[in-house]
Image (cartoon, rainbow, N blue to C red):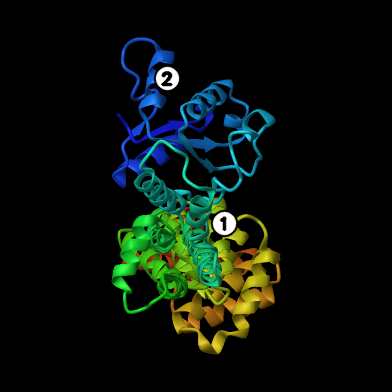
Amino acid sequence: MADVFISYSSVDRSVADAVCASLESNGVSCWIAPRDIPAGSYAAAIVKAINDSRLMVLVFSSSSNKSPQVEREIERAVSKNKVIYPLRIENVLPSPDLELFISSEQWMDAFERPIEPRLEIFSRNVKQLLSEASAPDRPRLEDVRKLTDNEPRVTVWTIVAAILVLSAFVTALSTVVHLLKGGANSFSIAGGATQILLVLLAGSTFLTAGRKLLGRSWSRLNSLGAARVWFVMSILIIVIALRVVLPGLGARYLNYKGDLEFAKDQFDDAISNYQGAEAIKYNSARSRLAKAYFSRGLRLDKMRAYAEAAGQYQLAIEYDPSDYAASNNLARLFILQGNPNRALSFLNNLVQRLPTLPVDVQYFIFKNLGWANLELHNYFLAENQLNWALIRRKGAAAQYLLGRLYDEQGRKAEAKQQWDAFIQSIQTSSKSEEEVEPDWPARAQELLHKG
């Protein structure tokens, strides 16, 4: 024999199970279909369970309002003079067929979600009804009304706590979205999970278990509502602090990973991490990205993949306009690709910054300036610039280009002198080979042979 028979529509099965669990956790035995139907006739089991129960709980909704089976169960309970205590989970009124048996003074509303806090109150009401029902007679309506009137109402504290929880949720969501701009990695996942867990902790204060724990932990406050507000506010402060701190830490983490990959010459992985750092916190990784793109461009340059290398140098300049090495190398590639005018636009910008650049860099700038003007047949400018380059350093590339310039002007003896110096430079210094194009040594030998 069970204390309570639970009547419900199959549509509301999950709510009915929750009602049953709440009642049984409060010491009220329940009969609920199909769990408690033994082998045999379904209808007979229902009738027997209603007859044996002391009270009927009706999970009342739009579905149960239209259910013929629920109506038959209600009629049976009324015929046996059973107490009916509805839990209204939707804001609907009883149909004409049920209105006769259900009074608005006898039901309890549980529209808000989560429903668990209301179920705890409902279970206490049911226990009180059972304890007062010494006979199968229906308890007085005044007693039921008193039970309902004693239920906690929505207070200002509740509204404030709900607003604070919502604020914490919005802040946490903003943090997660911001961290994920840098990609899904261990830091972004851990940081986002921490924020979400804090929000769930704040929201748990609206659940029965959370309220009990809160009441014990904040017992010095007389009001549970005030305790909830202070607790949620504390969590909100932590969430906001993490929102400020986590992006910077995430950027530093990705920069660190990128530095490790860069040290291994794994430029693709390094760039991926630097891009993530920049996406999280603007400008935090721009100089690193410029350095990584330049290094990748240099690798492609040495492989003679000039078009791809030019693209990498341009990206390096985009992230760091002051990257003189990328600008100079890009100018050289434009000359090789037959676009000396475009090369001059980059080189002339570098000339304006010449006093701030190292002497070795000045050599390469003047060498490329002379080369670009040589391709444009601006021989006077080209000769001056190549000689300026050689003043700064006796470089093989400038010697070759100056020899070519003299040859094109018919100054054969001077051309031969420069090519001899060029051949000697590349034979005595391995570094000289790095600055010359692959076909220049053979071309110089050929021209010397021709005389």
Q: Is residue 63 above or below residue 143?
A: above
Give above or below for 254 relative to 233. above
Above or below, comparing residue 64 to residue 179 in the picture: above
Could you tell me which residue is drawn at 62 percent across and 55 percent down? 337
The 10 Å Cα crowd at callout 1, few under 14, some 14 to 19, many 20 or more, is some
- Indicate left or right for 233 with 340 as reference: left
Q: Nearer the viewer, residue 184 or 151?
A: 151
What whole-number distance in Å separates the C-alpha atoms at marks 2 and 1?
83 Å
At label 1, the amino acid type is Gly
**Labels 2 & 1 near each other (Cβ < 8 A):** no
Give the x, y percent position of residue 66: 63, 27
Percent across and percent down for residue 175 are 48, 64
**Residue 260 location in percent, x, y?**
31, 63
Please name the residue shown 57% across and 52% down the image: 307
The residue that label 2 is drawn on is 47
Mark 2, secondary structure of its residue? helix
Give 282 or 380, whichever is nearer the viewer. 282
Is label 1 in a helix, a strand or a loop? helix
Q: Determine which residue is flagged by label 1.
A: 311
Residue 375, numbered circle: none
The crowding category of the residue bearing disc 2, from other C-alpha atoms within 10 Å (few below 14, some 14 to 19, many at least 20), is some
